[in-house]
Image (tube, coloured by chain):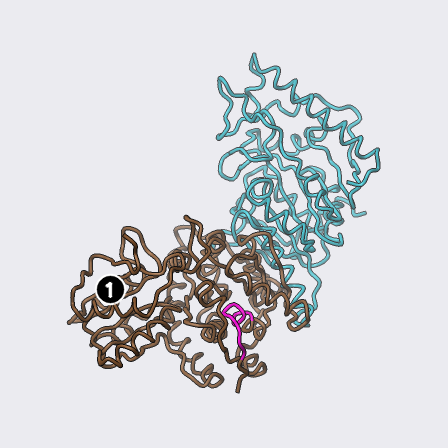
Chain colours: A brown, B cyan
Amino acid sequence: MGVKKAITGAQAAAEAMRQINPDVVVAYPITPQTPIVEHFATYVANGIVDTEMVPVESEHSAMSAAVGAEAAGARAMSATSSQGLALMWEIVAATPGLRLPIVMPLVNRTISAPLNIHGDHSDVMGVTTLGWIQIFSENAQEVYENLLLAIRVAEDERIQLPAMVNQDGFITSHAIEPVEIYDDDKVRAFVGTRSMERGLLNVAHPRTIGAMALPDYLLEVKRAQEEAMSRVFEVYHSVAKELSAITGHEHPLFEAYRLDDAEAAVVVLNSAAGTAKVAVDAMRDRGMRVGLLKPILFRPFPYAEIRDALKNVSAIGVLDRSMDFGAYAPVYSELRNSLFELDKRPKLQSYVFGLGGRDILRGDIEVVFDELLSGSLDPERQRYIGLRG
Amino acid sequence: MATLQEIALKTAGVEARIVSGHRMCAGCGIGTIIKTVFAASDRPVIVLNATGCLEVTTAVYPYTAWNTPWMHLTFENAAAVAAGVESAYKALKRRGRMSEEVNILAVGGDGGTYDIGFQALSGALERRHKFMYLVYDNEGYMNTGNQRSGATPFGASTTTVPAGTVSIGKPQWRKNLVEIAAAHRIPYVGQSVAHNTLDIYKKAQKGFNADGPAVLAVLQPCTTNWSYEAALTMKYSRLAVETNFWPVYEVENGFVHINVKPADRKPIEEFLKGQTRFKHLFRPGNEHVIVEMQKLIDEEWARLVKLEESGVQL
């Protein structure tokens, strides 16, 4: 049994990090990630953890030092948002190629310009091609649990890839919710210790890390990286099973909410899925067969499993909290790809919502369902929720 | 004090931390510099290498010239990577997961240090991570063919600021990295040269033994892009000191000490002659550039001597 605490999403991330007690935490403050670092810093200051904490001079150095620590053989973590992720992009890109399983909470925030500190997914959607495992969280409880899960998946011998655990800026990171924090000893036994055998500090076995690979070898390195990524599903399932023994509930690749007999469904990441559930319940009460699919593991993307979960739905609205200018929005694009193999494809509609932290309300999602059920859809033209003329 | 022979013995054989088979240019001094620095450490050395000549010539998959833990991440962050390694070292020692004593060495060229790696270096020095930062300074982006850096000297022709009918080459003097590093109030900063093995050795020892971060800046004449015969690297290294172009000195706990004082300072032309990057300075009409360069060198030297004599702590 755990303890219920009234905490924010940022604190939930810090709680997970307290229990993980990483060897090294390197971070630079950025709204809305800052409270994660601040909470963790108080744990360091009060001896609650004995992590070596390094408050660096930029996010570029944050990820660089995290990579150095991880390559040395330690378990290193960082955390960031938006512009910080953009500044560390170069090293974010290098980390999976070096097969260093750094786990990083990402508090999703709009990428400038215009400057905006609120939540959308334009930060993470700019890095999904780089080879990190991407996990999304609806609420503070999921932030906490996904971080524990991510450590084990990332560090698994078969994987050795970094992972980001996403939560919505402010909506999740700064809102207080009841979160069940599980027993420290059980969680610590679950997360274990990272082996330093392959690290630079294992001086008895000197290793060269980060050699240049020219056209004669690079393709094989990248293929090996992709194979590791493809093994994430099975590892995720087995780690999830172990985690379930602590949490008492399942940790699926995605959540299918009242989808079984649904005629219409929405697909949406992170906190808006919570709003969508309320809309689904309200419409179900009115007799409408609607449901929700909330992706959790976004990289690797479970195309086949999602296809199977949606195969009997006639109309699907995909809600994206970011855009891909001149192309289908990121989540919509994945759904189209996923469903292409079906003999009888559902009708699709792309919606863009919540940019720069604009609210999405239950009524907005009910309108989406009304449109999906009415059949007046245009899969080639994305619609904007709450756009002013 | 070790003799040259003892230092040479430490750099060779099965104990060597960098071995033959690397791809440095014939006549390059980086190998000599790094071997001498290694010789000054009795502990295992973990090397964090910025992108640059040393990196691209020593670790081309599936080969490596490194017989010591070595890592390359990217160009501008060797000091930040070293900070991460040092933090891991502290954490793992504190947690009883390792007991060996090691030295941590970040290495970069002048581009990766004076320019793009400057912020990461300053941050790591300010946080007082215990590591040594070694810059082999060949006064430009020599790995990619002689582009201008913050370390390129006044009057040098580079591919990004070439000499031309209305250009003397680089119109600015270089940054003073040693004094900038010393301004972080770190325990040790040294400036040395490729040919002076004993000086590099002594300074590397002081750097490794310092109670905090240390910076060692070593001039590394570049046969390829200063463009002189490969056999003359050590000659140009020596001339850089004999002309006061590159003073050999150190700042120990803030106190300046000049290690080599040429009895009879040679004119700067002797260093410039024979280097293609300075060839244009000997054309009619460019005499004033050499005059100005000589003036700058003499003023800098006089300032350095005053700093030493004053006994003022930087």
Residue A101 visible from this viewpoint: no
| Image coords of residue A384 (percent x, y) | 28, 58
Compared across the picture, whether B206 is left or right of A134 comes to: right
Q: Which residue is mark 1?
A: A336
Quadrant of the rendered image containing residue A276: bottom left
SS assignment for the magenta stretch, majority: helix
Relative to residue A326, is residue B247 depicted above or below? above
Residue visible at 24% across and 64% down in the picture: A336
| Image coords of residue A273 (percent x, y) | 35, 71
Give the crowd class for mark 1: few <14, some 14-19, many >=20 residues within 10 Å.
many
Compared across the picture, whether A336 is left or right of A184 comes to: left
Amino acid on which the number 1 mark rests in the picture: Arg
- Along the viewing direction, whichever of B171 and B202 lies nearer the viewer: B171
Residue visible at 78% across and 35% down in the picture: B258
- Along the viewing direction, whichever of B137 and B6 lies nearer the viewer: B137
Count of marks placed on residues: 1
Q: Which region is colored magenta?
A: A5-14
Quadrant of the rendered image containing residue B101: bottom right
- Along the viewing direction, whichever of A285 and B268 lies nearer the viewer: A285
| Image coords of residue A55 (percent x, y) | 61, 58
| Image coords of residue A328 (percent x, y) | 27, 57
B139 in the magenta segment: no
